[in-house]
Each structure stands twice: as C-alpha cells, then as structure tokens.
Image (cartoon, helix red, strand yellow):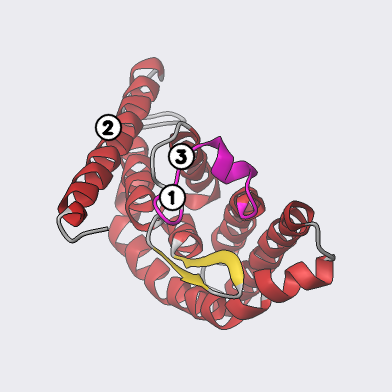
Amino acid sequence: MGFLHIPVLLYFTYERRDAALSWQQNIMKNITTTTPGNTSGPFSTQRLVLIAMVTSITCILAPFSIPIPISPVPISLTNLVLLISVYVLGWKDATVSFLIYLLIGAAGLPVFSGFAGGLGKIAGPTGGYLVGFIFMTIIAGIFVERFRDKRFLIITGMALATVVTYLFGTAWLAFQLEMPFTAALSIGVIPYLPGDTAKIILAVVIGPILYARLHPLID
C-alpha cells in the first residue's frame, strides 16, 4: 500500500467514528425524550450527559490497541476506561454506557479494538473478553460504590473483576481456537498481567479525582 492511501484510510476511519458518535447521541436523545422528568428521576439529564460522555470516550479510546505476536488478543485501553467509568457513573450507569458501546460496535461501526466492528468481532476469538467486560463493570463498580474510601478493597474488587473477565475471555478463546484451556490461558492472560495490574493502579488513582470533580453532576 502506497503512502497516498494513508490519508484516504484516515478519512474513512474518522468518518465512521463520527457516525458511531452520532448514532450514540441519537440513542441518548431517545432515552431522554422517553424518560419522564428530564431533570430528576432514574435518568436525569445530568446522568444521561455523563453516560453519553463516557460512551463517547470509550468509542474513541477502545479501538486503539497494540497487537502482540504470540496472541490474537491485543493490548487495549477498554478495561482501563471501564475501571475509571465506574467511579464517574457508578456500576449501573457504567454498565448502561458499556452496553450502548457494544450495540454501536455490533452495528458495524469501528469502535472495537483494532478499529473493528460488527457481530463477527463479538463472535470471534476475543469476543469472550467483550462479554466479560460487562461483569467487570458490575463487579468493580459495586466494590467502588460500597468501599469508596477503602482503596485496598477496591483494588481487590477490580482484581476479582479482571479474573472474571479472564475466565470468559479464555474459555471463548479456547473454544474458538480449539485448544486446551491452559494453552489459551498462556496466550490470553499471562502476557497481560503486568499491564492490567498497572491499569488497576491507574484507575484507583485517576478515578477518585474524576469523581471529586464530577460527583455534583451525578448527585
């Protein structure tokens, strides 16, 4: 591929990214117009804005990934965004945000790792991790909400949430590649332990700062 093709590829990549963000905004607009009481209640305007903001950030950051030669699973920022999002949104709204992100990706827009999209990505070798991220958001979010001032317990909860994600991802990876679970573990988990540990530490540091800045909007 020649260098002249690069600007064209970048153009279409960002055109599709804009389409993803536009579609996400339409979803949130529909929720707003169908929810009674836009300034209070289960989904206030402030909460919807924060959900939309976090979903947009996920759509922007999640596609950026680093492939590694020994595994079909790339290094991604998705789990870091999710671990921080539970501070900003709480586990319920963070889960809603991630489910909207999954819908956007399932519709074919390039918001998954490697700028991929479509149901094929969810059904592919790394699809188990995407499903596992739902449970990561719930588990980590519950620990953050219940033990907000107890950092050690939050780290424990995030570690547990990561293990659950690993189980979903490794089981599906083993099934897709027709290999033993232990072999899938060696290529789908072991190489990522240092990086995921660093992401948990970053989330525990950054999350409270964002919560302190944004919690008036949440409350």
Quadrant of the image for the N terminus?
A: bottom left
Identify residue for label 3: 105
Identify residue for label 1: 89
Magenta-tinted stretch: 113-126
What is the chief secondary structure element of the magenta stretch? loop
What is the secondary structure assignment of the residue under circle 1? helix
Within the magenta stretch, is there residue 193?
no
Query: Nearer the N terminus, badge 3 or badge 2?
Result: 2
Is residue 219 visible in the rendered image? The answer is no
Query: Nearer the N terminus, badge 2 or badge 1?
Result: 2
**Mark 2 and mark 1: span between their CA atoms?**
21 Å
Residue type, label 2: Ser
Q: Nearer the viewer, mark 2 or mark 1?
A: 2
Q: 101 or 49, which is in the foreground?
A: 101
Which residue is painted at 43% across and 50% down in the image? Answer: 89
Q: 104 or 31, which is in the foreground?
A: 104
Query: Nearer the N terminus, badge 3 or badge 1?
Result: 1
Which corner quadrant of the image does residue 165 belong to?
bottom right
Q: Position of residue 113 (x, y in %)?
A: 45, 55
Left or right: 145 as drawn, with respect to 166: left
Q: Nearer the viewer, mark 3 or mark 1?
A: 3
Are dots 2 and 1 in contact, CB under 8 Å? Answer: no
Is residue 58 visible in the rendered image? The answer is yes
Which residue is painted at 55% across and 63% down in the image? Answer: 144
